């Protein structure tokens, strides 16, 4: 061992932050939104969430058996399963949730090397996989409580929407995305624990608002703006999926760039795209450019280049 | 099997150096046209015909073509056959021609054909290159048909346009779209690698898989061969 790298003898100080602890906190933070989804959509939503979590955990466990390595105890599969379930419409049959869970864990996460190596958020990649494969099932939001289109689709068609209902969550949509309040409660919990910070969600939401102001075609219309903010998967995506440790940039400057990129892409998809939704595609596109953003924003090491302040 | 015999060339193209699963050549048509088994088969056989005939002609002309201009000369020969095949398809199989579209003229720049012309046909007497072309073409056809069949099965529930899956099966649409091609190609390549590694462990000689050398240097007795090289990977795989 080199003289310069002195490693003292044990005991070493250990941080109390573990993957298991972080994931458990995220699960807790997701509970309000998931709970509201179950209250809102009934027992079918609970079954769907259960199947989704069971399939991700089961897939992780079985893959672990195959490669003789247990990773299921770090709870990351539970988070993936919950996020996936919350991204499904309540009418989806159970096998859609199971297929999505298996795809998320096996194809997106484990084949690339497991937690920390996946280049895309597994839950979102699975949602997009399902959305492309079963467009009819994944956009069918009719249920006992609500019929008809989601608020965003109505907004796109030029109809008026009730913003108060959208903030509370009494609207059609996927299981976990409808209630802005429940999502914000969970997000505050994570921010207070220091697990996520406001860099990505903040720059994401602000840049999205600016984009809608500029190109939305409604000018400064407070009702339209708040409906765009409360509708769809924006809140769930900004606080819980864009902040995924694995697939966001690690540099601080890069996280702002990432947030702004997501805001612009979401705006492009929502306003110019054929669909009313755009959060999931925006975030997985952002995941793909993350390595480039990191390369662009890597800070210069002390003593390597940069400005020279010594007078010659 | 003796080196450069017809049977050895066919075996080489179909399994040992399968252009799709082992050499990973010709990926563009492999990913683009395999939306159904029949399209895969059609594309594979069309390429096989061009491959076999161009190999034969290039081998016959190998002493006439100067080395410096060999690539343009190969292209002229290949392009002529592609034109012939395309006109035949337009006349007799117009539906297949429509399905394959621009990928028929693009056979001209298929790297399997140029690769075989450059590495095999240009330096061998005509009969082995003919069988090399047939073997490679059949290997390509088998691979494309497999990919097409799996994509068609999962994406529409049919194989060769016949309903296979029960009615309760909901087609997984992504498999007939571009991403599905990557999923299926990766999965099939992984399966055949797994089988070959398993076969190698049982003591079968599959050690030269993927060496890419059509001259088979490891089994070559000629000590004076200038192209002879030592394939360290193959030795390692043998020891495994």
Image: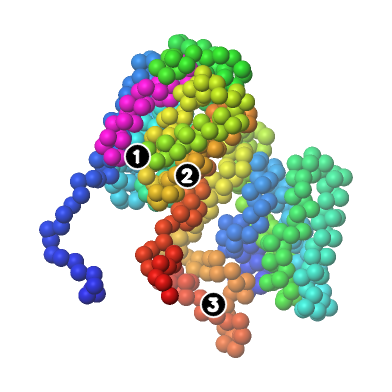
**Residue numbers of the magenta segment:** A171-197
Q: Report how far apart the C-alphas of labels 3 and 2 lie in the structure.
A: 52 Å
Q: Position of residue B87 (x, y in %)?
A: 86, 50
Q: Can residue A190 be seen from the camera position used here?
A: yes
> Badge 2, how many Cα within 10 Å: few under 14, some, many 20+?
many
> B105 or B45, which is in the foreground?
B105
Circle 2 SS class = helix
Residue at position x 35%, y 23% in the image = A182
> A259 or B144, which is in the foreground?
A259
Circle 3 SS class = helix
Q: Chain of mark 3?
A: B
Residue at position x 45%, y 38% in the image = A203
Q: Are marks 3 and 1 in contact (CB under 8 Å)?
A: no
Task: Judge left or right: residue A102 versus residue A265.
Answer: left
Name the residue beneath numbered marker 3: B218
Name the residue beneath numbered marker 2: A258
User: Are dots 3 and 2 on a single chain?
Assistant: no
Q: Chain of mark 1?
A: A
> B232 or A111, which is in the foreground?
A111
Q: Position of residue A257 (x, y in %)?
A: 48, 46
Q: Position of residue B62 (x, y in %)?
A: 79, 76
């Amino acid at each position: 061992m080199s003289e310069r790298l002195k490693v003292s003898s044990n005991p070493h100080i250990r941080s109390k932050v573990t993957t298991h602890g972080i994931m458990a906190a995220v699960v807790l933070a997701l509970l309000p939104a998931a709970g509201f989804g179950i209250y809102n959509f009934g027992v079918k939503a609970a079954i769907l969430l259960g199947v989704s979590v069971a399939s991700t955990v089961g897939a992780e466990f079985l893959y672990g058996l195959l490669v003789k390595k247990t990773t299921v105890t770090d709870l990351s599969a539970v988070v993936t399963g919950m996020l996936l379930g919350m991204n499904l419409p309540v009418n989806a049959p159970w096998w859609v949730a199971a297929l999505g869970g298996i795809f998320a864990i096996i194809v997106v996460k484990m084949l690339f090397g497991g937690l920390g190596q996946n280049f895309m958020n597994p839950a979102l990649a699975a949602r997009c996989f399902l959305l492309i494969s079963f467009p009819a099932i994944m956009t069918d939001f009719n249920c006992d409580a609500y019929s008809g289109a989601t608020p965003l689709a109505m907004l796109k068609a030029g109809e008026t929407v009730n913003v108060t209902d959208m903030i509370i969550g009494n609207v059609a949509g996927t299981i976990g995305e409808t209630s802005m309040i429940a999502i914000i409660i969970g997000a505050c919990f994570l921010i207070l624990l220091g697990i996520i910070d406001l860099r990505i969600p903040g720059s994401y939401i602000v840049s999205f608002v600016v984009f809608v102001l500029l190109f939305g075609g409604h000018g400064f219309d407070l009702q339209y703006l708040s409906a765009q903010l409360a509708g769809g998967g924006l809140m769930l995506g900004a606080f819980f999926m864009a902040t995924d440790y694995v697939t966001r940039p690690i540099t601080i400057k890069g996280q702002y760039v990432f947030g702004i990129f997501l805001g612009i892409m979401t705006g492009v998809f929502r306003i110019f795209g054929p669909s009313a939704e755009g959060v999931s595609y925006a975030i997985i596109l952002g995941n793909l450019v993350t390595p480039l953003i990191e390369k662009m924003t890597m800070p210069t090491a002390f003593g390597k280049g940069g400005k020279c302040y010594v007078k010659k | 099997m003796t080196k450069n015999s017809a049977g050895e060339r066919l075996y080489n193209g179909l399994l040992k150096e399968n252009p799709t699963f082992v050499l990973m050549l010709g990926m563009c048509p492999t990913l683009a046209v395999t939306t159904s088994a029949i399209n895969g088969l059609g594309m594979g056989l069309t390429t096989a015909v061009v491959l076999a005939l161009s190999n034969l002609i290039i081998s016959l002309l190998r002493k006439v073509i100067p080395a410096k201009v060999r690539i343009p000369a190969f292209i002229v020969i290949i392009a002529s056959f592609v034109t012939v095949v395309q006109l035949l398809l337009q006349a007799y199989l117009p539906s297949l021609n429509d399905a394959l579209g621009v990928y028929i003229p693009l056979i001209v720049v298929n790297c399997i054909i140029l690769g075989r012309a450059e590495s095999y046909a240009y330096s061998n007497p005509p009969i082995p290159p003919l069988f090399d072309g047939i073997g490679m073409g059949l290997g390509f056809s088998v691979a494309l048909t497999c990919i097409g069949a799996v994509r068609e099965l999962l994406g529409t529930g049919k194989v060769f346009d016949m309903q296979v899956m029960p009615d309760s099966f909901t087609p997984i649409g992504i498999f007939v779209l571009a991403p599905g091609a990557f999923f299926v190609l990766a999965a099939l390549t992984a399966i055949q690698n797994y089988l070959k590694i398993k076969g190698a462990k049982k003591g079968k000689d599959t050690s030269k898989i993927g060496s890419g050398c059509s001259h088979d240097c490891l089994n070559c007795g000629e000590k004076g061969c200038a192209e002879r090289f030592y394939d360290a990977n193959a030795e390692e795989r043998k020891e495994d």
